[in-house]
Amino acid sequence: MSNSPIFMLSLMAGLEMLSSVLKCSYSTLTRKSSLRSTLKIFLTRFPSVVLVLPESSHPPVVGVQTIKRTRGMPPLSSYPPGYIRNVGIGIRESFPTTMPSESYIEFELGRSLNNIANTGLDDWVVPESSPFGGNPTEDSRVSATAYLYRMLDIMAGIARTLGKTDDANLFASQAAGVKTAFNNAFWANDHYAGVGDNSYRQTHNLLALAFNVITSPSNAQAVADSVAADVNSRGGHLNTGALGTKHILPMLTAHGHSDVAAGLIKQTTYPSLGFWIQNGATTCWEHWAVEARSHDHFFLGTYDDRSYQSVLGIQTTSTAYKTVSVAPAFTAAIPSASGWVMTPYGKLSVSYNIKGQSLSMQIVVPVGVSTLTVSGDKVQVGSGSYSFVAQ
């Protein structure tokens, strides 16, 4: 059985779905749709929304001068029959009495000396590797151990949901042991580094941030700062492959470097998404280089996440998107944006425009009650279409 991070990634995708989506009811449209739309619909439910405009935004938000409801939304009963289908699926129904992942985790822990995992695969097809496939010159134990921790953390959450207290405590204890080992082995004052790394490794540090393996908020900020500094030292370029690319934009944005993230999106020289486009790409390739052997590998195409979660600011704040935060990462590089996500109740749409020190924003909330939080002030509103003005 493979113990590569890529194998772990496939397993964990299923575990994360079960732990964050299936443990309570979800709704999905019955009509046919594209794969991308189907996935968004499957994961999306918006009975309520929280709008957050942080004071550190660009421009500074000192309060909302205008909140105007422009129109209401039809009640749920007005949608066509069959438009919405409720499906109640829980982890308890999906898992047998014995958790199927226990044997694999025991297998991994059994061969992870002193809680440090090892692997034959790593951050596949980083820019410096061969366009025909290959690993970077770095310590593969860093990413492998980060994924081992993440699996144990997910399993602890699943066990708690199932009421399996003993299992939850065991997984949590094992995760804590791996976390301690990870930090003892790889922490280097303000970032993570492995034995034999040929340079600063963005993916080492992005996985630590994304999986919450870091021991303190101050260390997490230092790690994020180190990633941003490395991107800048490379002329505004990423240096990630199959494991790290998904996390670079959201982690930079979450830790105050949305300007650096925006720069990565707008980059057009190698390696970058823009470089693909400049060279005629209409799909996501397996490698950043034009010589990539495959032109259909979506693991480097996760920039879509940022478009919705950071630029528009649409993020879940509870299980299965019962509540949502709308908190755009405002930057001077992106003075305006608009977009929407289809939900079983209709579209959740966000648009905004920044002019000088003024911000105008429109949001359409699907059926349900919303709580809008603006710089600490809470305003209760119903579903509908709203305009906000701040400066």
Image: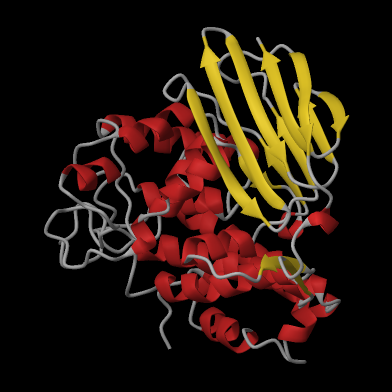
**Residue shown at the point (74%, 46%) measured from the top left:** 366
Q: Height in image: 342 above or below 216?
A: below
Q: Is residue 24 above or below residue 49?
A: below
Residue plotted at (42% across, 53% down):
302
Residue 233: image location, x then y, percent: 28, 31
Quarter of the picture containing the C terminus is: top right
Viewer-side residue, 15 vs 22: 22
Q: Nearer the viewer, residue 188 or 322?
A: 322
Q: In the image shown, does 322 or 215 lie closer to the viewer?
A: 322
362 above or below 269?
Answer: above
Residue 386: quarter of image = top right
Position of the N terminus, as image quadrant, is bottom left
Q: Nearer the viewer, residue 85 or 113?
A: 85
| Residue plotted at (66% across, 63% down) | 176
Residue 323 visible in the current orientation:
yes
Count of marks, rendered view: 0
Percent of width and height locating residue 8: 48, 73
Q: In percent of the image, x 59 and y 20: which residue is there?
A: 57
Q: Decide if residue 257 is in sight here.
A: no
Q: Is residue 206 above or below residue 257?
A: below
